[in-house]
Amino acid sequence: MEQTQIPIGMLLQKAVKIRTHILEMLAEAKSGHPGGSLSAVEILVSLYFYAMQHDPKEPTWPDRDRFVLSKGHAAPVLFATLAEAGYFPVSELKTLRKLNSRLQGHPDQRIPGVEFPGGSLGIGLSAAIGMALAGKIDKKDYRVYALLGDGELDEGETWEAAMAAPKFKLGNLTAIIDRNGIQQDGLTEQIMPMEPLAYKWKAFNWNVLEVDGFDLRQIIEALEKSGNMRNRPTVIIAHTVKGKGVSFMEWDPAYHGKAPDKDTVKKLVESMRNQ
Ligand SMILES: Cc1ncc(C[n+]2csc(CCOP(=O)(O)OP(=O)(O)O)c2C)c(N)n1
Ligand SMILES: [Mg+2]
C-alpha cells in the first residue's frame, strides 16, 4: 500500500484519545502500569486502526488477525484501544481494576477482542506461535502479532520461542518488541544487557526490522513488510520511551507501576487535547 493512503490524521487523533484514556483510567483506579502502556500507544494504533483485519462486531471471526499482548501489565493500552475500536463501550474503561469489572490489571479472554490472558511475562510469543501454526495448518490467511516488553526478554521461554518460529517457517507471525530500555526496577542494559538485540534475532533466523516506535509511517511500513514474508517470522524492534507523552514519567522507572493522581491527569489531558 502507498504511504499516501495512510490516514495519519485519524491515527494521531486515536493516539491522543488512547493516551488520555490510559491516564484517566489509572487515576480513577489509583493503580496500574502507565509507563509501558504509554510507550506502546502508536504500536497498537497502527495495528488496530490500520494494519489488522478485524471486526469489533464479530470478535471471534475465524479469519481475523490476532494480537497477543505478551507484556500483559500494559493492559490499559489494550483496553483503551479495544474500546476506541468499538469492542465495548469507552465508558467501561473507568471500571478498571474495580470489584466486579471485567477490566482488571491484566487482559482476560472474557473481554471481547482479547485473544490471550497475558500477565505472566515470557509466554506470549509461544502462544502466538501456536496461533500462527494453527493458521498455517488450517490454510487461513490471518496474521498473528505479539507485543513483547524488552525486560520481558529476560525470560528464557522467549528464546525457546524465538528458536521455534523459524523452524515452523511462520511467515504469518510478527513479533514487536517495545524497546523502551526500562524494566520494572531500572534500565534493561544494567539489569540484564541484551544488546546487540537485532543481531540476536538475526542469528535465530528472523527477519529483523527496526523502527522509531512513535513514527506511525515507520511502524506501518514495517508491518506491511512483515506481511510480505512467506516463510520467515518478522521481529520489529520498536524504539520507544517509557511513559511517552508525560514529561515527568518519561525515562523514569518509578512510573513502571505508579498511577498519577486525578488533578495531575486533568491538567495533562487538557494540554494533550489542546496540542
Ligand atoms: C514471570 C513474571 N515475572 C515478573 C513479573 C512482574 N513484572 C511485571 S512487569 C515487569 C517488568 C517488565 O518490563 P518490560 O518487559 O520492559 O515492560 P515495559 O517496559 O514495556 O513496561 C515485571 C518484572 C511478571 N509479570 N511475570
Ligand atoms: Mg521495557
Image: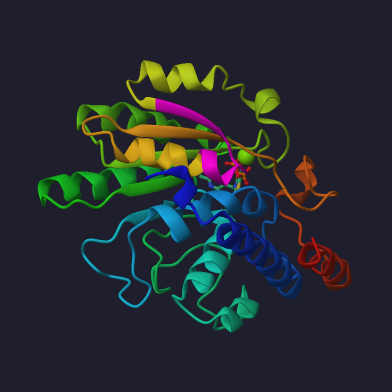
Q: Image height check: is 190 above or below 157?
A: above
Residue appearing at x 61%, y 21% in the figure: 193
Quarter assignment of residue 270: bottom right
Rendered view: 170 above or below 198: below
Q: Is residue 35 above or below residue 60?
A: above
Q: Quadrant of ligand 1?
A: top right
Q: Nearer the viewer, residue 152 or 82?
A: 82
Q: Is residue 231 left or right of residue 91?
A: left
Magenta span: 208-218
How many numbered tags mark residues here? 0
Residue pictured at 42% horizontal, 26% vertical: 208
Between residues 29 and 246, which one lies in front from this camera angle? Answer: 246
Q: In percent of the image, x 46 and y 34: which residue is there?
A: 236
Where residue 41 appears, x then y in whole percent?
Answer: 60, 54
State the residue in front, 214 or 197: 214
Q: Quadrant of residue 76?
A: bottom right
Residue beneath the point at 49% across and 21% down: 198
Q: Position of residue 257 (x, y in %)?
A: 71, 54
Residue 28 sits in quarter: bottom right
The extreme front residue here reads 4
Q: Left or right: 184 with respect to 238?
A: right
